[in-house]
Amino acid sequence: MNRESPHPQMDRLKASALVLVWIGEIWNVFEAGVALWSGIGAGSVALIGFGLDSILELAAGGILIWRLQTKWEDDEDESGAEKKAQKFVGITFFVLAGYIFLQSIATLLGYFREPETSTVGLILIVASAIVMTILYFKKMAIAEKIGSRSLRSEAKETLVCDLQDLTVLVGLGANFLFGWWWADPVAALGLIPFLIKEGWEGYMGED
């Protein structure tokens, strides 16, 4: 005989959060594939970095799926898992910040060939900005209701991906219109302080 959950509303919210995370995972698989394919073809470091960022998003989403699907025996176990998930998501922010820094500096110093324009890449960036914005607001709404810091951190990483969408869009657009290949790595460097701040808060368990 199945026992009813003592917190049915909380269970429904967690189930909704799980659906949102899965949607993000599926999108990121598609996004990573298209970005890497178009980035390599155009020699665009920005698009390649965007694709690698999507892979980091997959890792963060995977830990959230584990977190939300697991049935916990007591609140202490759930709290411990929450802290581990939040710390992992925080680490992904540091990894992403480090990659963007190295990629941007190497590009500005001329270690990579100047990227060509990519119509497929531009369309992908616009579509991704729309999808990630919707997912961010929906995840944040649920995170506030269930008090999940790890889901909130993962939602913020979704927002960072959205901000990077706009950065890459500006970079690719400037390259297409004016031939300013350096615009993308310069704009990407502006994301690093935000990434480090969110990574630190996630790793240290701060709200």
Image (spheres, rainbow, N blue to C red):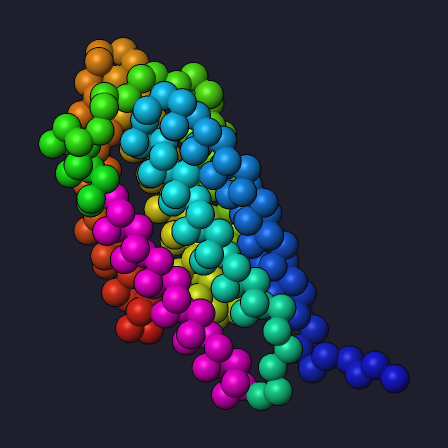
Q: Quadrant of the C terminus?
A: bottom left
Who is closer to the viewer here, 109 or 64? 109
Is 162 on the left or on the right of 175, as rendered?
right
Rendering coords of residue 84 (x, y %): 42, 74
The span shown in magenta is 75-100
Q: Quadrant of the N terminus?
A: bottom right
Who is closer to the viewer here, 35 or 21? 35
- Name which residue lies at 36% across and 34% down: 48
**Rendered view: 92 above or below 76:** above
Who is closer to the viewer here, 76 or 184? 184
Q: Quadrant of residue 10?
A: bottom right
Which secondary structure dominates the residues rendered in magenta? helix
- Name which residue lies at 39% across and 66% down: 88
- Name which residue lies at 28% across and 66% down: 201
**Rendered view: 80 above or below 162:** below
Rendering coords of residue 8 (x, y %): 70, 73
Rendering coords of residue 26 (x, y %): 58, 45
Give the tally of numbered discs.
Answer: 0
| Magenta-colored stretch includes residue 99 | yes
Q: Is residue 144 visible?
A: no
Rendering coords of residue 82 (x, y %): 46, 74
Q: Is residue 98 visible?
A: yes
| Magenta-colored stretch includes residue 73 | no
- Name which residue lies at 60% across and 52% down: 22
Q: Quadrant of residue 188?
A: top left
Is 17 on the left or on the right of 118, as rendered?
right
Q: Quadrant of residue 202?
A: bottom left
- Outermost residue to the right: 1
Is 16 on the left or on the right of 5, as rendered?
left
**Rendered view: 124 above or below 156:** above
- Outermost residue to the left: 109
